[in-house]
Image (cartoon, rainbow, N blue to C red):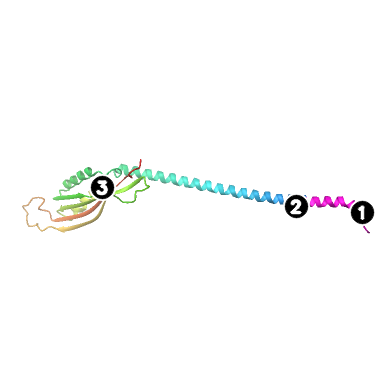
Amino acid sequence: MKLTLHDLAKLRLPLLAAVLLLAIAGLLAWWSMGEAHKAEQERDTAANRKGQVEQRLRQVRTEEQELKDRAQIFQQLQASGISGEEKRLEWIEMLRATQQALRLPGMNYEYGVQVPLENVDGTAYAWFASPMRLQLRLLHEEDLLNFLSQIEKDAKALVLVRNCKLGRIGNSGNPGGTHETLAQLSADCEMQWITVRRASGKK
């Protein structure tokens, strides 16, 4: 069967329609792919935002818990008297009372200048140390342990004993001497009285 020009003329419109339909189908496929890609990007963006929100919520919860923990610790420090300015007058009175209670023959002490234990820039609260040299005259070695134990228990500060040196006093042959001259040992201790307070310039 041969196609004549007349037959081709009849097929022209159907062929054009078929080509047009193929073009429309191609455009629809391209548009569908674009929409699918766009939807995938939107899903990824939404997932990223969700992840960021969840991460921020976890961070906020962690920060809230840290603040609660710090507040609880500071309340405990306040209750123990460790927080606030150094209380040297109270410390001195406590030292003297402890010496009298334990009947120690002699005591000398000297406080140094209070210094921060850390960099206070950008911090609300900071730890400070008040150095002290303590010299005691003792009847027995146990007197030193009892004295330090009582100080650590009663002091409105965190008392750290850095070192202590014990020495023997050569006056044991004087039974008729005073209570101070009856001392058998001397102790020379380096200590730190630790407190925490608001850093300078903080409100």
Q: Which secondary structure is most common in the magenta stretch? A: helix
Q: Which element type, helix, strand or loop, lies under badge 3?
A: helix
> What is the magenta range?
1-23
**Amino acid carrying mark 1 in the image:** Asp
Residue 133: percent from the left, percent from the top?
21, 52
**Amino acid carrying mark 3 in the image:** Lys
Residue at mark 1? 7
Direction from residue 120 to residue 28 in the image, left or right = right
**Amino acid carrying mark 2 in the image:** Gly
Residue at mark 2? 26
Mark 3 crowdedness (10 Å alpha carbons): few <14, some 14-19, many ≥20: few
For the C terminus, the quadrant is top left
Q: Earlier in the sequence, mark 2 or mark 1?
A: 1
Q: Residue at x 88, y 52 (%)?
A: 11
Mark 1 crowdedness (10 Å alpha carbons): few <14, some 14-19, many ≥20: few
Q: How far is mark 3 from mark 1, CA to CA?
A: 116 Å
In this view, the residue farthest toward the top is: 203
Residue at mark 3? 153
Q: Which element type, helix, strand or loop, lies under badge 2?
A: helix
Choose mark 3 or mark 1, whichever is in front.
Answer: 1
